Image (cartoon, rainbow, N blue to C red):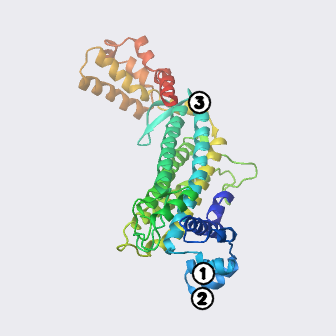
Amino acid sequence: MIERYSRPEMKKVWSEESKFDRWLKVEISVCQAWAEEGVIPEQTIPKVEKAHYNLNRINELLSITHHDMTAFTGAVCESLGEEGRFIHLGLTSSDVMDTALSLQLMEAESILDRDTQELIQVLEQKAREYKRIPVMGRTHGIHAEPTTFGLKLLLWAQEMKRNAQRLSQAREVISYGKISGAVGNYATVPPGVEERALKRLGLSPAPVSSQILQRDRHAQFVTTLALIMSSLEKFALGLRGLQQTEVSEISEPFSFGQTGSSAMPHKKNPELCERICGLARLVRGYALTSLENVALWQERDISHSSAERIILPDSCLVTDYALSLFTEVMEGLEVYPERMRRNIDLTQGLIFSQRVLLALIQKGLSREEAYHLVQKHALRAGKEGKSLLDILRSDGEIESYLSSPELAKLFDVEFYLRYVDEIFARCSS
């Protein structure tokens, strides 16, 4: 099911071969550490370092043992002969599995970080391109006041930068291993072996562990991916709104020969953005499962394991795919500035009501008086489909405070763009 959303590099990280390769790497690193402790003869290490496994043989043994670690170690030991007795010396399954899992998550994070940086680059480039292109700002789905399309994209770029920071923090939290035995007290493997083995693997020893690395680490990783996906959903939902027929300010990429509907040839649906919105729900569900995995019985039970075999690969695969897909959407986004301007003018000046309100207050009216006066005319203009400026000019009371040229000056879109450069400068510092 997840195959559709798999990109080759991330798919490789979560392949069976990749998992077993890392298990073997952990086993060999521990043997090397044992040799440095003087427990395993140094002369055996070159042969141990050549240990390998056969995937078919693992599956054969698994059908007998119903335990993937014993099937794996059995296959590895067969490749070594007598030296196979040093494999898994003093270890419990989670020493190998959890440590190897940290390596997989770190590699996945590197790919996701690259994806994130690529999207940030595209968003910032597009933000600069549309920096001063006016667009209608909407609150509650209703016209509020003008902003710029560049500012909307700059906002998204800054959010993705925060997500990049969160990813980095999640990587730090997951960059730990444990080689501490069945309940984490080093009864069968000393801390020195753990330190030496993990140093070879580029990991830090968990200061204290039980049989497993504690699952708050993994929960932070998956919830970080859920946050990233929620941001992508937010951006995609925003584009979907702007692509509605009545708005038509942008369009996601649509290639020649592409089909929007099997029944209606005219359709150009925002299906890429809709796809991202749907996948975000999936990863948020995985985040909830990762939180449920934090609480386990005493030093460990196995209730987290079955869920992790799904949620960890899938959340990485889906997030990788969604980041790449949204980057493609932004790169090929069609933007219609003329339509944006027409939508700004759609309500014939209603969007400038706050400027009139503030101007009347500055002329001496109380806020309540000014608000009531402007609202009365704004509601009439909206109901009758007339220009707010024309209606205000016909009111003698307003004319006694604001001349016709003064009123006209208040109906200028450029007023809302005067601090755009300053906002961009803030975000580049």
Mark 3 = which residue? 128
Which is nearer the N-term, disc 3 or disc 2?
A: 2
The one nearer the camera, 288 or 76, is 76
Residue 405 x %, y %: 43, 11
The amino acid marked with disc number 1 is Ala
The amino acid marked with disc number 3 is Arg
Assign a secondary structure to mark 2.
helix
Q: Which mark is residue 64?
A: 2
Left or right: 236 with respect to 60?
A: left
- Looking at this view, name the residue that lies furthest to the bottom: 64
Quick check: 242 above or below 338? below
The amino acid marked with disc number 2 is Ile
Measure how far apart labels 3 and 2 are at the Cα level. Answer: 62 Å
Q: Nearer the viewer, mark 1 or mark 3?
A: 1
Mark 1 = which residue? 71
- Looking at this view, name the residue that lies furthest to the right: 257
